[in-house]
Amino acid sequence: MDTQELLTRNVDEVVTEEEVAAIAADPAGKRAYVGYEPSGVLHIGHLLTANKLIDLQEAGMEVVVLLADVHAYLNGKGTFEEIRETAEQMRAQFLAYGLDESKTEFVYGSEYQLEEDYVLDLHELELSTTLSRAQRAMAELQGGETAKVSHVVYPLMQALDIEYLDLDLAVGGMDQRKVHMLMREELPGLGYEARPCLHTPIVADLTTGEGKMSSSEGVTISMEDSTADIESKVNSAFCPPTRDPEGDLENPVLELFEYHVFPRFESVLVERPEKYGGDLEYSEYEDLAADLESGELHPADAKGTLATYLDELIAPGRAALREIRQD
RNA sequence: CUCCCUGUGGUCUAGCGGCUACGAUGCCUCCCUGUAGAGGAGGAGACGCACGUUCGAGUCGUGCCGGGGAGACCA
């Protein structure tokens, strides 16, 4: 797989292809980032962007993980003490999951976001951005919550972070694209360069197959799930025997294979009783999806296999969590 | 600071002084399918808080709290 392909595989949107191609041409030492609001437990949504970070490291890039403590504070997630504690747990889980420690820089937002230069640039952004624009960009504002001033400052800081962390590339889920577009429009006005972005897909809800609602509610796989939890959650997942269900629905089981399993494993072994045809082995997601579509692979067997591989992915993080919680 | 509107299960919602508070959706359980969904059968879950009026208040009044809107101030 060439570098451009490695950088852009499994992403929904590349902004822009040309700019990312320039990075792919010479990835060594280039810096990419994802910002996360600290969370004590990583869930499958965090892991999707983490997979992309692993790809980027494999390509030779450096990765910056922003532990966005100030953002979390602005979003009402607690005191700084509480936020920092969950941030440390998050860091441990990312490393356990497979981020290369030697190529990963973890940065707290509060390390630089309170400094004068940053704050003055932030005020300049506030001056040049309309309220409605900032509010639309605020992906974190879910449901019918009423916007606070903090909520509109939030995305402006995200835009500014991309400059202050000295990045070459911004990574985030599709839910972050409005923030990134705001960044691309506004940074030049402050005399900074707009950076390219990669947007990962948002995986459909596991039980309904309804798409695109990030991590808000519903069943999700997380680092604190036991093997039995994962089996149970995967087993109850929506999974029609097709890659393209009716309407706007997606097949979450296939999505998890595509975005989480195949990128991390050389091949996938489906253990199956002789009665149903015996074991199957896949080295490509496409082959597995095609077999599910044709009926060669039954959804029940796909689910059992998915649970096994997800469990293997989660296991190190789960162990790390257990260790943290014992202290 | 003042005034107006608003507050029922997770979400949306009926109720308009009177039996164990309607319904939808979501959620949980079971049946049915070699998965899930769909379908069928069950189940848990609510009147923001406090006084007061009344024989009796989700339903009326007052206050507080929360949400929305407007006005005043022009420093």
Image (tube, rainbow, N blue to C red):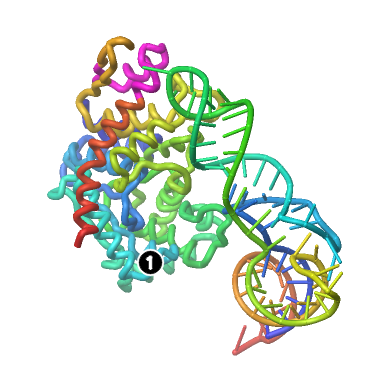
Image: A82 above or below A18: below
**Residue span colored magenta:** A281-302
Q: Is residue A113 magenta?
A: no
For the residue pair A212 and A242, the one nearer the viewer reads as A242
Q: Quadrant of the C terminus of chain A?
A: bottom left
Q: Is residue A63 left or right of residue A186?
A: left
Q: Quadrant of residue B9?
A: bottom right
Q: Quadrant of the N terminus of chain A?
A: top left
Q: Is residue A147 left or right of residue A221?
A: right
Mark 1 nearby-residue class (10 Å; few <14, some 14–19, many ≥20): some
Residue B35 lies, in percent from the top left, at 43, 25
Image: A241 above or below A7: above
Seen at 36% across and 57% down, the residue is: A37
For the residue pair A143 and A139, the one nearer the viewer reads as A143
Seen at 53% across and 57% down, the residue is: A135
For the residue pair A151 and A19, the one nearer the viewer reads as A151
Which amino acid, mark 1?
Asp
Q: Is residue A300 magenta?
A: yes
Q: Chain of mark 1?
A: A
Residue B68 lies, in percent from the top left, at 66, 64
Q: Look at the image and tell me whether residue A31 can be seen.
A: no
Which residue is identified by label 1? A121
Image: A242 above or below A166: above
Residue A56 lies, in percent from the top left, at 23, 40
Image: A308 above or below A317: above
